[in-house]
Amino acid sequence: MNSSWRDESAWWQRGAIYQIYPRSFKDSRGDGIGDLPGIASKLDYLAWLGVGAVWISPFYPSPMVDFGYDVTGYLDVDPIFGTLDDFDELLTRAHGLGLKVILDFVPNHTSDQHPWFQESRSSHTNPKSDWYIWRDARRNGGPPNNWLSHFGGPAWTLDERISKYYMHSFLPEQPDLNWRNPDVRDAMLDVLRFWLDRGVDGFRMDAIQALIKDAQFRDDPPNPNYRKGVDQPRDSLLHRYSQDQPEAHARIRDFRRLLDTYDDRVSIGEVSYSLSLNDLVAYYGRDDGLNLPANFKLITLPWQATAIHEYVDRYERALPSFAWPNYVLGNHDRARVASRIGSGQARVAAMLLLTLRGTPFIYYGEEIGMRDVELSVHQLQDPHGIRVPGQGRDQARSPMQWSAEPHAGFSESEPWLPVGASYRTINVSVQREDSSSMLNLYRRLLEYRRETPALTIGSYRSLDGTPDDCFLYFREFEGQRLLIALNFSAKDRTVSLEHPAKGRVVLSTYLDREGHINLSSLRLRSHEGCLIEL
Ligand code: GLC
């Protein structure tokens, strides 16, 4: 097989994208907070692991109320994380190792400390007064409508000085920009240009579903399925008017058009977790939409073979021919996969993620099976968790576990969040030496995926009629054929295939078997996945 398949696909289709939460990856200065030189010092590791790109969560100047998702300047680096020179050095080093670098772009809102907001709130006549979403109180004096913030409470805060409410989809310290104002769009396109000119390879666009709100500011309707006391208060409403407006697609088109004036850049969007397939697919565009609207279903679906099988088939069918799938197993907003589904299942999840058709997203630490940390109330840092008990995201943001040294080799001093209790065994340095570790499973899967077109860009077809707790599928490219067989159950399962009857195991999630097998009776152990060449 020649290697032209590489030229016919984009780098972001072939390589896995590794998400780094910069506060927690590696601290180079001993202040307990990760930084850009820290990340740069670990790029060799990421190249060894075999990912194709890193996406770095925000490192821009910020009061850190939402840990960087509240930006006060889009064209710089917060001193906590380093300098622009540090960033340039990181980028050069990454490119030298063949790694792409994707930035987090936060277009929906700024910090309330951003000079734009300061100007906007200074007076009705300020040229930036319309850069944010300002509305008068209702006649009864309350907020302009019933919209709710993601982080608890109303999505409106009164600015008493100018007697108007401003809108915030998230914290009051994160006012939403008014994307119906072309000046906002132009300023943000300049932000993208700034980083593109510096050489970044693309953007993960934050909260893109919230960009445009209903022009008439209608109340969101009640959610008939809301379970009081069970669901989050925000789920009491359907967010029909406060997000996911069709006009957002025109703004995304502007981003995409700009990115396409540069070579080979990628646009990834954080969209709503609960989108219908039709609405998710609408965020794609051959040349006017996103390359990868993030697909969070592996996070939100029940961890059952039938549910996942059924979803992957539907997703595959719903995608237009030009659209490329993607799968997210974890991120900085959700519990870690090993804690959600257990360590045994996390291996099956790794094989699933890295063998499905589509770009895999790996959240830092998943490759060693890091688990959520337990925190006492006084250790909480995340404003969401502080405002809405139980909704915190700190547990999935603990320091990367590099070694069994103090603070898991993350820092010389006490980290900003506690390290995981099991860091002495769950860490990179121990797992590098252990041929059956999670780390080596990830590494071998990534290596095989990179070299095998059937896995990287080949077609997908699932098999019906297997035991309910197993999920089997073929990946195929020009005569190269693979079977992936995943046992989601804690019990042994036997699957039988008539055609073909023979295969060769290349990789088991146990990392303890290879070689020829009889497919008419293939025994899978508890939580075992096998990658089989046919
Ligand atoms: C996105 C981010 C989340 C952040 C929010 C507000 O959902 O993933 O971490 O808090 O946007 O910016």
Image (cartoon, helix red, strand yellow):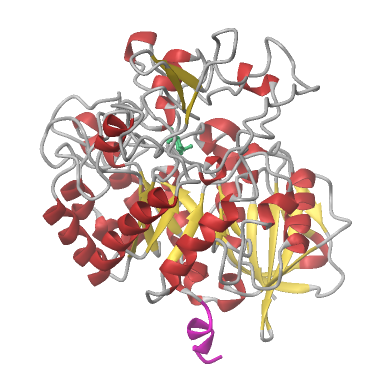
The residue closer to the viewer here, 292 or 428, is 292
Residue 509 visible: no
Q: Which residues are magenta?
A: 1-9
Say if 108 sits above or below 166 in the image.
below
Verify whether residue 434 appears in magenta. no
Q: Position of residue 382 (x, y in %)?
A: 38, 23
Residue at 67%, 18% in the rendered image: 231
Say if 65 sits above or below 456 in the image.
above
Say if 175 sits above or below 47 in the image.
above
Residue 375, quarter of picture: top left
**Residue 9 left/right relative to 412:** right
**Residue 252 left/right relative to 105:** right
Which quadrant of the picture is home to ligand 1? top left
Q: Quadrant of the C terminus?
A: bottom right
The residue closer to the viewer here, 319 or 174, is 174
Residue 262, quarter of picture: bottom left
Q: Position of residue 302 (x, y in %)?
A: 71, 36
Residue at 58%, 15% in the rendered image: 138
